[in-house]
Amino acid sequence: MPTTRRSAAAARGRPGPAKGQSTISFSGRVTKAVPKDLKKAVTDTPAIARTTIPERPASKDEVPKKEEEEEAEAEPVAEKAPEKTEAELKAEKITDAQIKKYWKAIEKERKAPRVHQEDLDLGEKVLRYFDVSSQYGPCIGITRVKRWQRAERLGMNPPIEVLAVLVKEENKENDEVETAHMDRIMNATALFT
């Protein structure tokens, strides 16, 4: 059965909605009817409700908090360096020759050399290649080390050479390698003069 079409003239004949049907107001006012007692209750209550939590009675075995704080002050707390994971220990053992071999294998897959990256050092080339490798997840908004660790946790087997470059740069205290180059570009602020 063919579909029936409504003519434009028929639509012009009905100026508003059908009887009993309300219209939507975009004027910013609340069009819903609210009882006056509810309006008054909302305006009378303070913006922040304050609650007090009663202290629970101390048991005989518990040490009072003041004594615990004094004991904590008496013992100097030594800052511990974070323990390195097995992957980081493995990455520290990777030599520059192994990283160079890894990069040459990647370059061998290409038809033409990367002309736009000639001025970059080998470590930065490896890191940028990792940045654009989408199988390890997004590179924006996360540090490269965290991205590598997340990919490792998820069983994606990210290249250990990338972590090796990151560890070596971290030992040199080079903070620029923490974030992806693309992340720096995306978060850059343009200055117009």
Image: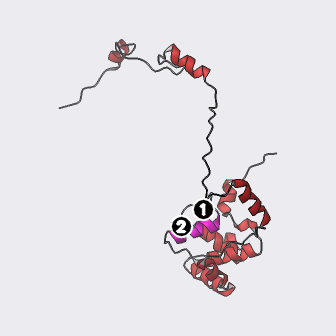
Q: Amino acid at mark 1?
A: Cys
- Which quarter of the figure has residue 8? top left
Position of the C terminus, as image quadrant, is top right
Q: Is residue 2 above or below residue 101?
A: above
- Which quarter of the figure has residue 28? top right
Q: Which residues are magenta?
A: 143-153
Q: Residue at x 62, y 85 (%)?
A: 101
| Residue at numbered disc 1 | 139
Q: Is residue 124 left or right of residue 11?
A: right
Position of the N terminus, as image quadrant, is top left
Q: What number is the disc on residue 136?
A: 2
> Which residue occupies the foreground of this view, 131 or 166?
166
Marks 1 and 2 close (CB-CB < 8 Å): yes
Mark 1 and mark 2: Cα distance apart in space: 8 Å
- The answer to whether residue 172 is visible is yes
> Which residue occupies the foreground of this view, 23 or 188?
23
| Numbered disc 1: secondary structure | loop
Mark 2: few/some/many CA within 10 Å (<14, 14-19, 20+): many
- The answer to whether residue 29 is visible is no
